[in-house]
Image (cartoon, coloured by chain):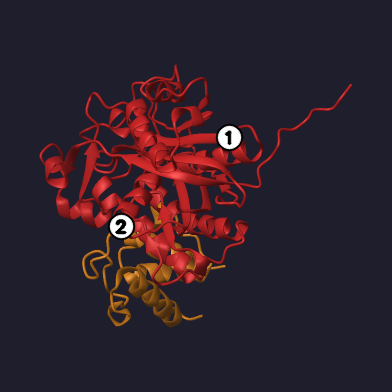
Chain colours: A red, B orange
Amino acid sequence: MTGIRLAPTSPGSRIAGLGHYRPEKVVTNDDLAQIMDTNDEWIQSRVGIAERRFASPEDTVATMGATAAAKAMAEAGMTPADIDTVIVATCTAEVQVPHTATQVAALLGIRAPGAFDLNAACAGFCYGLAAADHAVRTGSARTVLMIGSEKLTSWTDPADRATAIIFADGAGAAVVTASDTPGIGPVAWGSDEQHTQTIHIPDRSGRLFQEGQTVFRWATSAIAPVAIEAAERAGVSLADIDVLVPHQANLRIIDAVAKKVIAAGARPDLLVGRDIITTGNTSSASIPIALDRMRAAGQVRSGALVLAVGFGAGLTFAGQVFVCP
Amino acid sequence: MSNEDTLTGLAEIVEEVAGVSAADVTADKSFTDDLDIDSLSMVEIAVQAEDRFGVKIPDDELANLKTVGDAVAYIESHRA
């Protein structure tokens, strides 16, 4: 009897293209103040959001993901034939069965890829990027389309001022392919299993509930150490990080995390993703949307060293360093 | 460490988190009404105070700390 043979491995993987999609419909704080007891000053000071995007009925988790993915493939110079694996990180799929990844493959004409969804809530992009990196390096995949796509508005109570002002819709995607040198660092991932109900949807007809203050306390104290650990695992000095992209949960959490990462050795002029101001909280889509928009604005150049950290329901977190395409 | 040292340390945290001058952080001041500190900043202050003074300040206890003096008294009576 012969032993199991492993696939040929790759010394590294890299992100070869990024893309994002934001729905057309802009919803301002004043729009929300028409339907619930809130106001622009309160939302901007507590959450940091000025406006967000809400999906139309025609936008689904799959269509938004496919639109973002097509842009990432175009940047990478890849055709559908080049993609052999599709991963969709989402916690807001319209239905449980079928999962979203095969729907995205069908929309893009990707034939017979390995296809699966992954739910790590707002940490989904960093978990998915790790899964893509692992699949490429171990030879399970050649090129992975990794997508974070969310339609949070399907799962929030539109009149709940604790959640409806925060959560929004959108998608971001990355093409991950083999590389002679590592372009994606080891993931620092984990969870806090003592707080499973801090953010939850009670049942299939229920609406998203969040203990805001508990999440805020956890995120402002526990997440900067995850980002710092991710840099350490990648063997990268914090001073070498060009861009910090935390999950876009709340501007005050983002700023608190950035302050701690700078205090731990990052440069004072560290660029920080603050896309929540005009995009809202799009869960697993927030990191690629934020980074791609910073690239489009000319703030982040190809080759920049990015430190991303996702965190959310579970409670769950993950972070890693990667090279910006 | 005396009450005065605790007050000085707390005032430094309040200044860093909320941008209120440490000199204005005196025992009689209300965090909300006098220093204009909101609930999220109170959480950040609590997290830093926990690290600095080695106390636990859970959210339900935090809600009872109306004045700077309340916070100093809480820290003094709960520190290890």
Say which mark, if any, is on residue A142. 1
Q: Position of residue A264 (x, y in %)?
A: 51, 69
Circle 2 sits on which residue? Answer: B39
Q: Does the CB distance between marks 1 and 2 fall below 8 Å? A: no
| Circle 1 Cα neighbour tier, 10 Å, few/some/many (<14 / 14–19 / ≥20) | some
Residue at 15 percent across and 41 percent down: it is A32
Q: Are marks 1 and 2 on the same chain?
A: no
Dot 2: element: helix
Viewer-side residue, A101 vs A52: A101
Describe residue A117's horizontal placement relative to residue A3 as left or right.
left
A238, above or below A289, in the image: below
Seen from the viewer's position, the closer of residues A12 and B67 is A12
The answer to whether residue A117 is seen in the rendering is no
Quarter of the view holding residue A53: top left
Which residue occupies the extreme left position in the image? A34
Report helix, strand or loop for mark 1. Answer: loop
Label 2: how many Cα within 10 Å (few below 14, some 14–19, many 20+): some
Where residue A304 appears, as percent x and y from the top left, is 45, 59
* Residue A298 in sight here: yes
Q: Percent position (x, y) of residue A102?
A: 45, 21
Q: Amino acid at mark 2?
A: Ser
Q: Quadrant of residue A258?
A: bottom left
Q: Amino acid at mark 1?
A: Arg
Q: How many marks?
A: 2
Q: Residue at image x 31%, y 50%?
A: A293
Tell me the distance, in whole angstroms, between the alpha carbons under discs 1 and 2.
49 Å
Name the chain letter of the residue that bears numbered label 2: B
Q: Which quadrant of the figure contains the N terminus of chain A?
A: top right
